[in-house]
Amino acid sequence: MQNIKIFFTLEKKDQLIFFMQFTVIFNFIVAITKFFLSIFTHSLWFGVNAGFGFVLVSSKLLTIRKYRKIKVILDEYIKKRREEYKIYLQNGILLILLGIMYFFVSSYMYFNGTNTNMHEYITYLVALIAFYSIGTAIYGIVKYKRSTEPIVKGIKITNFASALTSIVLTQVVLLDTFSKNYDSRINGYTGIGVSFIIILLGLYMILGMNKTIKSIE
């Protein structure tokens, strides 16, 4: 009870970082699950999404670690903000690299198909995880929509990018499991579209950063 009371006295940014520590554990478990599914089902899609998940988990851990260092900087607002925007920039660059990787994999799938053969119960599990990711991403966007904190904005955007890849993965497993003789190129189209959105999100973070930094000086 005492910890709960302390939690509600924290700033919104501190609350978000607190929750982020728990989501990192969940995201890691999901990434491990996708990795093993990629082995058992021989699915490149699962392998790519597992890799995407591991990179995002590493990014979140780095964000938490650096945020703790920033917290000890006292009475230096500009310095704090600059350090936070360094994290923001790193996440933006990361999204661009992941978007490019996702583009090439989606292009490969466009020409070669997906063929993720699995039991329908596993398909339901994948869909459930995807809907959870989408729901938490939307919740974060709505709850912190007015926040101008760079760390908060960075977390919102990376969570949204992760949710987009979950949508693609859900589409792939649902169509491969329940549809027969469908045009598998549709998965490639969706993946390519998502890759462009992820790249644009990364560019938005980078291009908008310099202007914001100047505004705090």
Image (cartoon, rainbow, N blue to C red):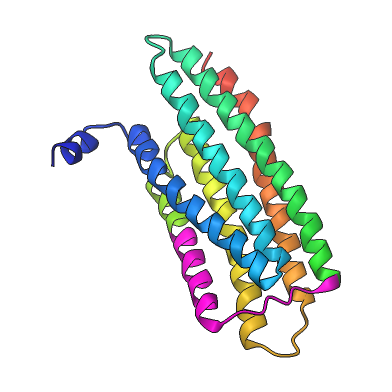
Asked whether 190 or 112 is in front, the reply is 112
User: Magenta stretch: residue 130 in it?
Assistant: yes
Count all numbered tags in the image, as a single digit.
Answer: 0
Residue 172 place in picture, x, y as percent: 66, 73
Quarter of the N terminus within the rendering:
top left
Residue 22 sits above or below residue 178 on the image = above
Residue 19 place in picture, x, y as percent: 36, 43
**Residue at the location (55% across, 77% down)?**
123
Residue 43 place in picture, x, y as percent: 70, 68
**Residue at the location (64% across, 51% down)?**
52
Residue 149 sits above or below residue 1 on the image = above
Residue 82 sits above or below residue 100 on the image = above
Residue farthest to the right?
Answer: 111
Image-based side of 195 in relation to 84, left or right:
right
User: Magenta stretch: residue 52 in it?
Assistant: no
Residue farthest to the left?
Answer: 1
For residue 68, what is the image quadrant?
Answer: top left
- Confirm whether residue 54 shows in the render: yes
Asked whether 85 or 55 is in front, the reply is 55
- Confirm whether residue 208 shows in the render: no
Residue 187 place in picture, x, y as percent: 72, 72
Residue farthest to the bottom?
Answer: 180
Image-based side of 111 in relation to 172, left or right:
right
Residue 6 sits above or below residue 170 on the image = above
- Tell me which segment is drawn in magenta: 112-135
**Residue at the location (39% across, 20% down)?**
71
**Residue at the location (48% across, 55% down)?**
29
Image-based side of 23 in relation to 199, left or right:
left
Asked whether 183 or 208 is in front, the reply is 183
For residue 120, what is the image quadrant?
Answer: bottom right
Image-based side of 110 in relation to 96, left or right:
right
Q: Main secondary structure of the magenta part?
A: helix
